[in-house]
Amino acid sequence: MADPGGRRLGATIIALFFVGLLLVFFAQIATVLFLLFIAALLGVYLSATTDSIVRRTGLPRGGALAVAAVGSLLLLTGIGFLILPAVVQQTQDLIGALPAQAQRLEALLVRVVRQYPILERSLAVEGGGFVESLVRDATNFVRGSLVPYLRAGGALAVELFSVLAMAIYLSREPAVYREGLISLVPPRYRHIARATLADLSNTMRAWVWAQLLAMFVLAVLTVIGLAALRVPYPLAFGVFTGVVAIVPFFGTVVSTLLPALFVLINTGWVHGLAVALLGVAVHLVEANVVAPLIFQERIRLPPVLTIVSVLAMATLIGVLGLIIAVPLLAAVMVVVRHVLIDEIYEEASRGRVASAVLVQTTGERATVALPEG
């Protein structure tokens, strides 16, 4: 009679072997998975816009998708024609002024060090000054992340086209891909898959709309505030603030300190402090007024996990990893909550209000109860 313990050990070893093979396989196609996730985020935006057009106009989904795609493209083009020339001009002027500003900041730090010798060791950097070291490190990080993509011009074009094509197909017939994923799950667990995918879709939609709104609000408020404080290049700084808002914490710090430092070394501490306080106030308004209105308490990401996610994705992928760090973390938390905590550990949170989420299935519509939060 065979030993049950030996059979279990053999099965465990085989399972670990196949898990290892899967991890190696995923590591080899990491770039493809990255592009697929970007396409899924873009598909979420197109799908949400398409659903809204279908509800309001009654157009067939294909026509509504065409309206959503073309309308989004026209909107971006119109905004580009309105503000892009001024933004490009101010950005070019700002970049041209940066070397002189860096030297002034270096001189300011030297004066501070002379007054407070305890800072001398912390600001001493081999091979150049402290500011030069920061600029050099940031430049190396960006170059190491983006240059491989920019050098492969043909490959980059193919990847961009692939992302757009996948996003359109995903938003055209989302039920096909959803049901395909669900069919891979054993029948007795398919209710978990449906609930997880429904929650995942709602979470990603909330993140996409919240992120777009946050970027717009931050850019507009920053431009208005900097113009009122007579800060040079308000459009360039405002657009930069909106763009880097996609990176939590780090984007906030950089977009607040950069214009403040620029003003500080030219017009003094009082003006620099006012600009810094403006940046803090703008981000507080976005975080406490704008974001809760559209997030609707759906996405609650612990700050420490968010920072770790950003650092990990920046290490693995570089600058482009910063774009997907937060939505990827949100997606992982949805899966962990539904699969690990609620089902495997059977610790579904008590007292949470359940909301009915309508899920389109093949040939039927089923209602799946999802916990909020």
Image (spheres, rainbow, N blue to C red):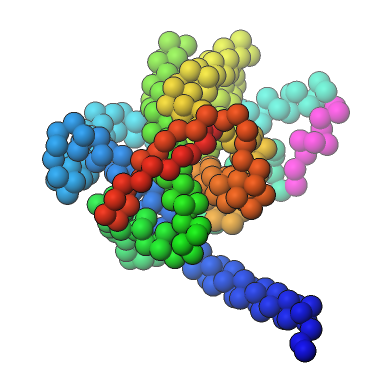
Quadrant occupied by the C terminus: top right
**Vertical comparison of 282 with 102: above or below:** above
Q: Is-magenta flag for residue 125?
A: yes
Q: Is residue 186 above or below residue 252?
A: below
- In screen coordinates, is 345 left or right of 222? right
In-image side of 166 versus 5 (left or right)? left
Region of the chain picked out in magenta, as a range: 117-126
Q: Is residue 282 visible?
A: no
Identify the residue at horizontal 75%, vertical 43% (top origin). Answer: 125
Quadrant of the rendered structure where residue 225 is? top left
Q: Estimate the x, y position of residue 262 in percent, counting from the top left.
A: 55, 24
Tell me the residue at 46%/52% (across/down). Answer: 191
Where residue 166 sits, quadrant-wise, is: bottom left
| Residue 271 % position (x, y) | 57, 12
How far from the left and from the top, in percent, is residue 20? 63, 73
Nearer to us in this view, 349 or 96: 349
Instruction: Indicate the quadrant containing the N terminus: top left, top right, bottom left or bottom right.
Output: bottom right
Furthest-bottom residue in this view:
1
Of 74 and 116, the residue lying toward us:
74
Residue at x 71% of width, y 27% of height: 109
Could you tell me which residue is drawn at 49 percent across and 44 percent down? 327
- Is 149 in the magenta? no
Q: Does residue 287 show up?
A: yes
Q: Residue furthest front?
A: 1
Q: Which secondary structure dominates the residues rendered in magenta?
A: helix
In screen coordinates, is 293 left or right of 256?
Answer: left
- Of residues 216 and 357, which is closer to you in this image? 357
Q: Residue 5, image x and y in percent?
A: 79, 78
Q: Residue 135, located in which quarter of the rendered image?
A: top right
Vertical position of residue 286 compared to residue 142: above or below: above
99 or 140: which is nearer to us? 140
Looking at the picture, does residue 110 appear above or below residue 178? above
